[in-house]
Image: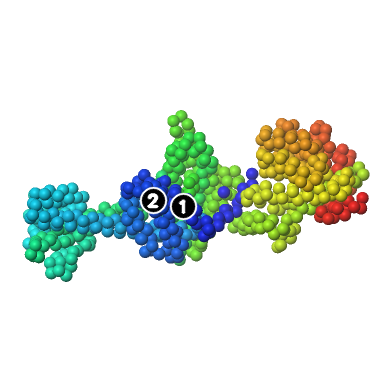
Amino acid sequence: MAMVDQSGRNPEPRTTLDEFPLVREDFAHRWTALISGTVMSNVSRAELEQTLAELTTLVVRAVNTDPPVAELGRRIGRLMVEHDFISSETLERSIAFLGDSLIPHFRLPPEWTGRLVRVLGCLAAGYSDGLRDRTLDQQELSKTAAVIATRRAEEARHDSETKFRAVFNSSAIGIAVIGMGDQLLDFNEAFLSLLKYEADALRPIAPSSLLHPEEREAMTLVMRQIVAGDLEHFRGEARLLRDDGEIVETLLALSLVRTPAGEPAYFVSMIENMNEVRALQSQLVRQSLHDVQTGLANRAQYLGWLEAASGTHGPNELVLVHFDIDGFRVVNDAFGHDVGNRILTGFANHLRAVFDGVGQIARIGPDEFGVLVKDPKDTPSVIALVEEALDLLTEPVYIDEHGIGVTASVGVVARQSRGVDALEMLRCADITVGWAKADGKAQWALYDRERDLRDREMCVLAASIPGGLELGEFHVDYQPVYSLADRSLVAVEAKLRWHHPDRGVLDPEQFLPLTSSTGMVLRLSRWAVERACEDAGRWFAEFGGATPVLSMDLTARHCQEPELVAEICKLLQRTGLPAEQLQFELHASLPAIITDDQADELDILASRGVRLVLDHLAGGNVAAERVRQIPLHALKFAARVVHGLADDADVIDKSVTMALVKWSGVLELPLMADGVRSETEAARLVELGITSAQGPLFGPPMSAAEIRALLSER
């Protein structure tokens, strides 16, 4: 989460007001694509997308309010019902999509996940209310149709009876006609199914006896009020008794049908099973807090567990264990997502086998899992379980003839829980996983606060590089390179330095390694090359052939640019610097990481006159085959090789230096040296055939103005 950025991720900025319309339209477009096949209403895709864009605005507004406005969340759920999004699959996909995508899509703070969960809960409740009201409205329509059919039966009995019976018999809602003397006059099949009665057994039963004993008195009062005209109708929840004595929760609508003379004729009761509605609501809530693929809790619920555990009534100690599958994309790319999902399910089952009864397990990312352990016996006991889980992962899963196995990098964070910040613990777990990956993967790492503080300090430095470049804090200084034979100035090596307002002057070794994690390495490299070529171009225009060669590092990332040759040629043309006056130093590790095409680019660059030097030779492995493809003009030894020639140098260091210089002589290229500190070292370098050198012996780095002054004195 090579040197790996051990600092965690830098948070993305929140979506601005100017960006919001476009971001919202993209979000609504994705939402539409997800649910369009499940929506039952007859609307065009454009109309559906516009509706979802409006709902997106409401959801973002609700999440942006702290605490979230419950009524706004309920309103969103009701609006979904009003727009005929009444399929359970539509709601299921919508809640899953909002829960997984809203916060990252709009770049909202991760700590707002709790708000989003509460908004989705209110949405589900509002959806349930809307569905209930819709059902009741349908009941009212059915009731009205029944009443009208009864009245018209007196005028056109056959026609009206047919219409009424069609509604009555086919309705999925239980309907019962109750006489004024507390007798069942009629009922439909749905009513029988609801109460699980046979028709013959139900007919003689008084309707009031079907009510729960605690409901009867209240319902009798309601019926009297309707008869008296105090109530037009009644709609509310009621408990009924089934044939086997089981209690069923229902939503009951009761209306009175009167004769043409206004006398009470009978009641029409419409009844819906609320157990099913509540089961649907519970299912929606569960789905919003669980991962569909593995059945484990999702990140939202995991964060809720962590927040609860870090409260004042939580356990004394918490241990977070985060598993990140190594190279999971390889499985998906090789075998497809179906196989990848099977691997994820198997991974989840391994974690259950090890941690069930010990900790709470969740899937917290596409290929990440978390385990929250409360008040463990001790940290080593948890680590023992981690190692057990890693051992289980070594067993391959056989898909057809392929035995597919994965490994995982694990971060373990142990903390005193009370008062700890939940998001801070997650951050610590994430960076600890990053340490495990950086150390070779397929292992666990334990959180180290001191290491974290050091990494965070470096992270702050890395994050401030763009601002430093914008504010003009970066400069190019020049290290003179002298001929060892006559001490004449033969080249200057450009060195990028950062004049940091708080840390002082920083050498490239102190900040350039950080740029690989921020993506700034290419931008800094280009800036330094351009600035140095501009300075050297001015020197050449003034001093001509007396101008020393400009030498500077060409980073691996810059070397990998497909238009490298064209870029350098345009720069030389613009600055007036001849190609023969430019020399690029290639790190000794670079030949091993570039491709054949990139090596060809370097060959073309050399053919245009640019010199290439293999730099930082220090005895490590060099890709000899690739070196033969690059037209080198010289070799340059690192300072530690030169220091092996000092009087007080270790015997082994001296022998390594001598062997390396002897090997380099085979290439029959000019030899250079860096970091020369004394005349003794300089003299021994001359004896070994090294022609030019730089380092503290020859003075500190100089500014462009100081180099110009030096050239003017010659």
Tag 1 residue: 25
In this image, 708 relative to 260: left or right?
right
Q: Position of residue 252 (x, y in %)?
A: 20, 59
Residue in view at x 69 percent, y 50 percent: 524
Q: Earlier in the sequence, mark 2 or mark 1?
A: 1
In this image, 468 relative to 143: left or right?
right
Q: Which colour scheme is used?
A: rainbow
Q: What element carries label 2?
A: helix
Give residue 86's mark.
none
In this image, 562 relative to 73: left or right?
right
> Based on the displayed image, in which of its 4 quarters is residue 453 positioned?
bottom right
How far apart, in angstroms, are the residues tagged by discs 2 and 1? 13 Å
Viewer-closest of 644 and 197? 197
Q: Position of residue 159 (x, y in %)?
A: 11, 49
Q: Position of residue 182 (x, y in %)?
A: 9, 61
Viewer-closest of 672 and 602? 602
* Residue 120 in sight in this render: yes
Viewer-closest of 216 and 324? 216
- Residue farthest front in this picture: 155
Q: Residue flagged by tag 2: what amino acid is it?
A: Glu
Q: Is mark 1 on a helix, strand or loop?
A: helix
Of labels 2 and 1, the one closer to you: 2
Tag 2 residue: 47
Q: Where is residue 450 in the image (x, y as percent from the top left)?
A: 62, 57
Reply above or below: 181 against 351.
below
